Every structure is written in structure tokens, then in C-alpha cells.
Image: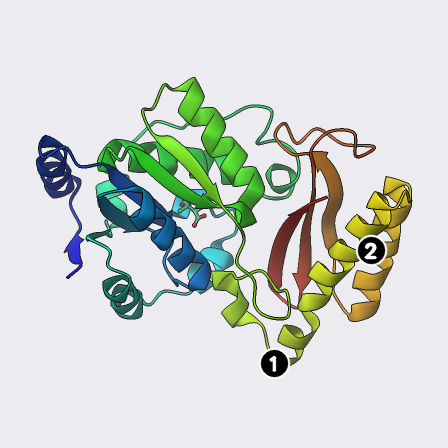
Amino acid sequence: MTQVIRSSAELRERVAAWKRSGMLVGVVPTMGALHDGHLSLVRAARAQSDRVIVTIFVNPMQFNNASDLEKYPRDEGHDLSLLEAAGVDVLFAPGVDEVYPQGFATKVSVAGISEPLEGAFRPGHFDGVATVVSKLFGMTQAGRAFFGEKDWQQLQVVRRLTTDLNIPVRVIGCPTIREEDGLAMSSRNVRLSAAERETAPALHAAMQAAAAAMREGTPVAEALDTARAAIAAAGFGTVEYLDLRRAESLAPAEDLSEPVRMLAAIWLGDVRLIDNIAV
Ligand code: PAF
């Protein structure tokens, strides 16, 4: 049975009792609207920890757009039934006042790696992520934390802050889970219309084709241009970025001589899709 805890004091007691018994605690931070991608993180957490906490908190501080925050899907009852079935020990679902009590005045800001890509198009987003993740690490006291590679830049930001702030948690990145047609699973996908849902997999297909072309020797800029044209032809809106970057530093990459990642953020109707793949 999954216990629902809303107060960090109660969570702290629960975790302290587990730790006194020598248990390793894993956490999966989420914003709810859970899908198979989240459940794959839960499976990884269960395999690598003795007790698993899933957090659900739609973090206002990381939304740079009020309507995105308002429209963010929420269904805690359904989420809880999925977590029960997945064998999660605790759902930590604090309210906004529990996370940001009156007088809250601290911001965690990770320079450099937060700045390009998502950081450029969503100003303040990663400050919100870094702040809430630091708080969730403090509140859960977990030894392991599981994040999806779908949010590749977020994963690098979380790794950086964990190292920089000496937080005693091991950050584990887990592969992106995709629908059968290649669309990366995301809580925002439920907002796609039927027609948009049909178009959506064309993003991953274009990225895969560009990656294959690069591996066969097509210059990076040319392969990315071809992908942009395919994405436009498929009916997508604005391409915010479609870029090749060094996998860890996210510095621009001109070739495949080091581990690289192709990352994209693209609008489809009023839904913003992000994706990334190794090349
Ligand atoms: O990836 C998410 O769902 C969120 O950015 C996270 C890590 C839970 C922080 O709010």
C-alpha cells in the first residue's frame, strides 16, 4: 500500500526510520500526470533501492508561462492507483505552502549548462528546477534519485548541482520511453489533438534520419537543415531549437568526435514538444 505524505516533517520521520533499519531510499521526482515513462523510473528505483518515494509537485517556480502551469494535467487519484500497482512505498505530494512557505527567499541557479537550449527559451525554468530538486533532495534524504533522459538538459543540471552542493545522492539517468511510433512519452502529450498526435512522431523520425545521415558523413549543419525541412513539411510550428551538442557540457558540437546529443524543442499546435537522442 502506498502511503500518501504531505508534510516534510512526517516524511523525514518515515525516512529516518527506514535508514535506521539500514535501508537505501530511492526517489523519483515528478510533477504527476504519470505515464509509462515515469513508471520505468519507478521500476529502476525499485530495482536499485529498498524503499521508493515518488514525489508529485507541480512546481510553479519552473513554469515561465502562467497558462502552461494552469493547463498542466493533474490527476492525483489516478497517479496514486498507478503508484500502488507499481509497489511504491510513499507518495510525497506536498502543497505549495509546504515547499515554499511564507518568507521563502532562496534560489538555486546553475550557471553555464542551464543557459542554452531550454534555458534560452524558458528563462528562469532551470532556476525553478534546481531549487525544487535541491529541496526535494533535502526533504526526502534519498540516497538515489532517478530522472528520465527525456529531459536531458535537466539531468545534466541536476548532476551539476548535486556535485556542486555536495548533496549525498546518486543521480541515475534512465532511458526515454517512447510510444510504438517513436513519440517520446510526456505528460503534455495528452494535450495533442488527434491530428497533432498523428503528426507528432515525425519529430523523432526526422531526428533519427539526421543522426543516421551524420553517422554516414553528412555535415552536421546539412543534416540538421534537412531535418528542419522535414519537420516543417510534417506540419509542425516553430522550431525553437534543433541542435547537436556535446552530451555532458551541452557546448555546440560540429562533428561526432566526442559523445554528442541531438536536442529539439518544437511547437505542435499549442503544445511544446521536446526530444533528444544520442548520435
Ligand atoms: O521533470 C520533472 O517532472 C520536473 O522538472 C521535476 C524534476 C520533478 C522538478 O519539478
Check contact, mark 1 vs mark 2: CB within 8 A: no
Residue at 50% x, 26% y is 110
In which quadrant is the C terminus drawn?
A: top right
Mark 1 neighbour density, 10 Å: few (under 14) some (14–19) many (20 or more): few
Residue at 71% x, 61% y is 203
Q: Which residue is mark 1?
A: 194
- Against 101, residue 274 (above or below) is below
Along the line of sight, the residue nearer the viewer: 273 or 183: 183
From where the camera sits, is residue 72 visible?
no
Q: Which residue is mark 2?
A: 228
Secondary element at tag 1: helix
Give the quarter of the image for residue 82.
bottom left
Relative image position of residue 5 (x, y in whole percent): 16, 51
Left or right of 163? Residue 152 is right
In which quadrant is the N terminus drawn?
A: bottom left
Give the quarter of the image for residue 103.
top left
Along the line of sight, the residue nearer the viewer: 33 or 240: 33
Left or right of 3? Residue 138 is right
Residue at 50% x, 71% y is 190
- Against 277, residue 141 (above or below) is above
Amino acid of disc 1:
Ala
Along the line of sight, the residue nearer the viewer: 214 or 76: 214
Q: Which mark is residue 206?
A: none
Relative image position of residue 124 (x, y in whole percent): 52, 37
Q: Give how far apart the Cα atoms at labels 1 and 2 are.
A: 23 Å
Residue at 15% x, 45% y is 7
How is colour applied across the structure in the image? rainbow
Mark 2 neighbour density, 10 Å: few (under 14) some (14–19) many (20 or more): many
Among the two numbered marks 1 and 2 on one chain, the one whose residue lies closer to the N terminus: 1
Relative image position of residue 62 (x, y in whole percent): 45, 43
